[in-house]
Image (cartoon, coloured by chain):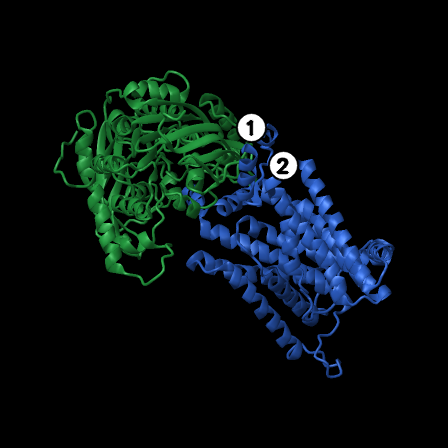
């Protein structure tokens, strides 16, 4: 009888429940993360095998194709630079719970502003002065592009997610207009492209990669200090936690939102300068190239910690460069290579769920005392 | 075994945890048919969690529940209703734009057409049977809190509940309304319903219940017959040791006018007056109580004084303590402007983690909330905040793993100690506290009363916004009673009775005995 009752009880209990975890030990968290990546690689194996390739060879190619030599390493670093920079740009905004998904447009506006001076002032200034002017212009342009949604949010409470997203398309439209009209290269044989920059407007290289890598590493340290130890960083954290608390503390919330978004846009704008002047030597519709969106993943996976962002941005750059490499050496289509990187990203993001929650299955209930007595 | 009456509900060895927090540990108790059982315990003792498992909100990790002699698994509120169990939650779950009747039948899946007349008739029958007073066609947004509660109770009865659980039903009621509710509960009991009333108010336990079950820190302590016990014995069971229940009230020395609020009027976003021509004076060396039903303008009044709520008209004059003769009008000034004038005002808001503190920061980060901006340096100066945090932790016995632990993880009482500690540390001459003991255990509550009295004796003007009339009458020198945003009376805390304050809260009385 007791036996029957126990079974009855168990069948009526929900099969799976989700329970919030209390804080997990750091080591265990990393175990879950590494486990997730291994699982992702395993699933990727299946996918590659279905495509008819040897998974081990493909994975090997991803690594050698992104880290296997000085020239590919340089490309990988070049991919990582704007990714890291944009993630650093997003960090203070996200800390403030201001969902800036407009880094894409802010990068583009920075690139446009820098390009103006590169195209029309290259013979008027010495190289260092020209580069400095380009950098400043990109900072101001990106900053203003970040300030606009912040202003509307602070004054009238508009939704920043939509606002920043829409500004991306406006920035892209401005670039397309310039490329097809006023800034079109007359020597472009009819193609609507912008001319390559003069040597004067190109960033110098250190260890074979443009000096942008030094800039973003310096920014990493700076952002860490700013967020953690500065008064501004403190204000950002309080506003992000609760605007009511910020007002209670006597903070000028509108000013903090606008200042922080100017900073966020400015850093993103500076990345636009690094891309046009350091990597592409020209401006085109691909200048921002989705970096502003991918950077959200970087910032989020790093829990807004600048130093962890370096790691994540590097990892994503390896994936990007590696998947380019397998496209050429295995004739894997670009879309399939993207699926492979997406699988890895999916598992990395998904494992955060298992760090915060656990699933409780019916049969794992340790109320076996009842069963034992039955 | 056969002779004992069948229990309506039995809990057997119930355990429920949330992460590392054990809300209920091995709790067994029973509810008899046709009785009123008080479930008594301090905040955080697991009363509501236990009852939520009966109402289908949570599912126990261990143990089982027996209803009418049969073991059951209650997985959803619907399962609970099928077992004729209904819970009236502390926070009402009603649709404002619907009528009482519409809210009552909401979610019922009955076949056939929606027959308003039949429903209204049935609601009237239930009302008449138990002594409720409810118009089924009235919209919820037109209702007072007590009426909303009536809707919630009838909603449960309409679904045929035989077991009713009421979670802190009197928290939002005046003494008169409470008495009316109790009469209704007695009528239900006479009709054979079994009732659980969750509460931490001892006088109510004594007045209404047949038996009292006591929980402490998630553990079941005991069940006693109400007639065999008294408030002191219950308190000792609840807290786990002997406690004295008296609050000190020293006689004010040399009270001086510190804050003069004159004809203060504020409106909300829709232009409705939330404060209407409010005038009163708060004196240094005195505790001034603010009483009223929840939502009578208490929050707006505090925030207006602190510079956080826009003022339409009137004045708030602050007379400087350091600089006699100087007075400032606080109206239209931001909190920072008020501070820059040298007005030493401390404010403990009712929403502790949403306004007074930053939940994700530790004590250190919270200590500097109002002072971080001092000086021209770019970087934060944390040393003095760390010292202050350590000092408050020691002096107020704040239980926290470290001064860096996010305050969100602390218990309600410790959170409040951090907040009150910081505000008192700013050496205010005016201290405003809103519901400072809400959610605190008895021990922490008495610590807070002691701190407020220390401030009073140091000459600070203390404004105490409270909800528990017993405490207001024991602690405050004078009490301002708010009703619908207006001052309905200013009374002397030493001579006024609870009933008189209750009448003023609903503005049915004409008492005005200025202290």
Identify the residue at the far left of this view. B510
Specify whether residue B293 is in view.
Answer: yes
Chain whose colour in the figure is green:
B
Residue A135 visible in the snapshot: no
Disc number placed over residue B474 in the picture, else none: none
Spot occupied by residue B356 in the image (x, y as percentages of width and height): 42, 38
Q: Is residue B263 above or below residue B35?
A: below
Residue A28 at x, y percent in the picture: 68, 37
Looking at the rendered image, the disc whose residue lies closer to the viewer, 1 or 2, is 2
- Dot 1 alpha-carbon crowd within 10 angstroms: few under 14, some 14 to 19, many 20 or more: some
Quadrant of the rendering where the N terminus of chain A is positioned: top right
Q: Give me the C-alpha separation between circle 1 and circle 2.
A: 18 Å
Residue drawn at 71 percent across, 47 percent down = A36
Q: Position of residue B201 (x, y in %)?
A: 31, 29
Q: Chain of mark 1?
A: B
Q: Which residue is mark 1?
A: B402
Q: Chain of mark 2?
A: A
Label drawn at residue A24? 2
The one of A111 and A102 positioned closer to us in this rendering: A102
A257 to the left or right of B85: right
Q: Residues within 10 Å of mark 2 (few under 14, many from 20)?
A: few
Q: Where is the C terminus of chain A found, in terms of image quarters?
A: top right
On the rendered structure, is A276 left or right of B170? right
Asked if residue B369 is positioned above or below residue B245 in the image, the reply reads below
What kind of element bears circle 1? Answer: loop
- Left or right of B93 in this view: B57: right
Which tint was used for chain A? Answer: blue
């Amino acid at each position: 009888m007791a036996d029957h009752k126990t079974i009855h009880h168990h069948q009526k209990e929900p099969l799976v429940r989700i329970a919030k975890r209390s804080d997990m030990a750091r080591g265990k968290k990393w175990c879950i993360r590494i486990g997730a990546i291994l699982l992702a690689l395993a699933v990727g194996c299946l996918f590659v095998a279905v495509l008819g390739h040897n998974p081990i060879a493909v994975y090997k190619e991803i690594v050698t194709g992104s880290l296997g030599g000085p020239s590919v390493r340089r490309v990988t670093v070049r991919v990582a630079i704007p990714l890291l920079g944009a993630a650093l740009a997003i960090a203070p905004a996200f800390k403030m719970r201001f969902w800036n998904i407009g880094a894409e447009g802010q990068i583009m506006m920075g690139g446009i502003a820098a390009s103006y001076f590169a195209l029309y002032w290259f013979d008027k200034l010495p190289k260092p002065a020209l580069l400095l002017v380009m950098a400043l212009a990109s900072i101001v342009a990106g900053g203003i592009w970040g300030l606009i949604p912040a202003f509307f949010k602070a004054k009238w409470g508009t939704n920043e997610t939509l606002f920043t997203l829409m500004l991306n398309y406006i920035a892209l439209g401005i670039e397309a207009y310039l490329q097809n009209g006023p800034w079109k290269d007359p020597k472009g044989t009819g193609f609507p492209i912008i001319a390559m920059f003069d040597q004067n407007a190109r960033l110098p290289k250190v260890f074979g990669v443009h000096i942008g890598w030094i800039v973003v590493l310096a920014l990493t340290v700076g952002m860490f200090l700013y967020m953690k130890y500065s008064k501004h960083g403190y204000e950002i954290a309080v506003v992000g936690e609760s605007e009511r608390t910020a007002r209670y503390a006597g903070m000028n919330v509108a000013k903090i939102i606008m200042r922080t978004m100017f900073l966020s846009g400015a850093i993103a704008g500076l990345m636009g300068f690094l891309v046009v002047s350091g990597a592409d030597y020209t401006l085109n519709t691909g200048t921002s190239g989705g970096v502003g969106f991918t950077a959200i993943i970087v910032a989020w996976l790093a829990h807004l910690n600048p130093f962890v962002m370096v790691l994540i941005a590097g990892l994503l750059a390896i994936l990007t460069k590696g998947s380019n490499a397998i496209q050429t050496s295995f004739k894997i289509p670009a879309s399939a290579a993207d699926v492979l990187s997406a699988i890895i990203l999916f598992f990395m993001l998904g494992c955060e769920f298992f760090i915060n929650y656990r699933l409780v299955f019916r049969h794992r209930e340790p109320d076996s005392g009842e069963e034992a007595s039955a | 075994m056969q002779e004992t009456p069948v229990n309506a509900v039995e809990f057997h060895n119930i355990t429920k945890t949330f992460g590392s927090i054990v809300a209920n540990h091995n709790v067994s108790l029973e509810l008899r048919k046709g009785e009123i059982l008080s479930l008594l315990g301090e905040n955080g003792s697991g009363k509501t969690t236990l009852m939520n498992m009966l109402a289908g909100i949570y599912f126990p990790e261990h143990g089982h529940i027996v209803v009418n002699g049969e073991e059951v698994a209650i997985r959803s509120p619907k399962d609970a209703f099928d077992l004729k169990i209904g819970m009236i939650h502390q926070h009402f779950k009603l649709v404002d734009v619907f009528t009482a009747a519409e809210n009552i039948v909401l979610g019922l899946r009955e076949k056939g057409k929606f027959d308003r007349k039949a429903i209204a008739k049935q609601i009237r029958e239930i009302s008449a049977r138990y002594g409720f007073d409810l118009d089924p066609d009235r919209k919820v947004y037109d209702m007072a809190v007590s009426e909303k509660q009536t809707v919630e109770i009838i909603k449960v009865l309409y679904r045929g509940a035989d077991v009713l659980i009421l979670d802190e039903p009197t928290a939002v009621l005046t003494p008169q309304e409470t008495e009316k509710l109790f009469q209704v509960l007695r009528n239900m009991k006479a009709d054979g319903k079994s009732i659980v009333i969750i509460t931490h108010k001892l006088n109510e336990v004594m007045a209404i219940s047949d038996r009292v079950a006591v929980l402490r820190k998630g553990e079941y302590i005991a069940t006693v017959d109400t007639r065999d016990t008294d408030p002191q014995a219950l308190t000792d069971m609840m807290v786990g040791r002997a406690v004295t229940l008296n609050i000190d009230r020293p006689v004010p020395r040399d009270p001086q006018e510190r804050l003069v609020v004159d004809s203060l009027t504020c409106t909300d976003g829709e232009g409705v007056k939330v404060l209407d021509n409010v005038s009163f004076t708060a004196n240094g060396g005195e505790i001034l109580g603010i009483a009223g039903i929840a939502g009578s303008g208490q929050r707006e009044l505090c925030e207006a004084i602190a510079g956080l709520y826009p003022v339409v008209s009137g004045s708030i004059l602050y007379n400087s303590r350091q600089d006699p003769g100087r007075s400032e009008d606080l109206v239209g000034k931001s909190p920072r402007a008020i501070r820059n004038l040298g007005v030493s005002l401390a404010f403990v808001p009712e929403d502790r983690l949403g306004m007074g503190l930053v939940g994700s920061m530790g004590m250190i980060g919270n200590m500097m909330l109002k002072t971080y901006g001092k000086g021209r340096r770019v970087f934060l100066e944390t040393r003095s905040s760390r010292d202050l945090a350590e000092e408050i932790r020691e002096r107020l016995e704040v239980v926290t793993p470290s001064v860096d632990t996010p305050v969100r993880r602390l218990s309600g009482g410790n959170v409040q100690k951090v907040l009150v500690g910081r505000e008192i540390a700013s050496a205010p001459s005016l201290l405003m506290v809103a519901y400072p003991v809400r959610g605190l255990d008895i021990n922490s509550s008495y610590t807070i009363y002691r701190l407020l009295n220390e401030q009073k004796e140091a000459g600070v003007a203390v404004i105490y916004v409270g909800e528990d009339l017993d405490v207001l009458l024991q602690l405050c020198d004078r009490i301002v009673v708010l009703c619908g945003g207006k001052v309905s009376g200013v009374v002397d805390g030493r001579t006024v009775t609870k009933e008189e304050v209750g009448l003023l809260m609903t503005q049915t009385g004409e008492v005005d005995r200025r202290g």
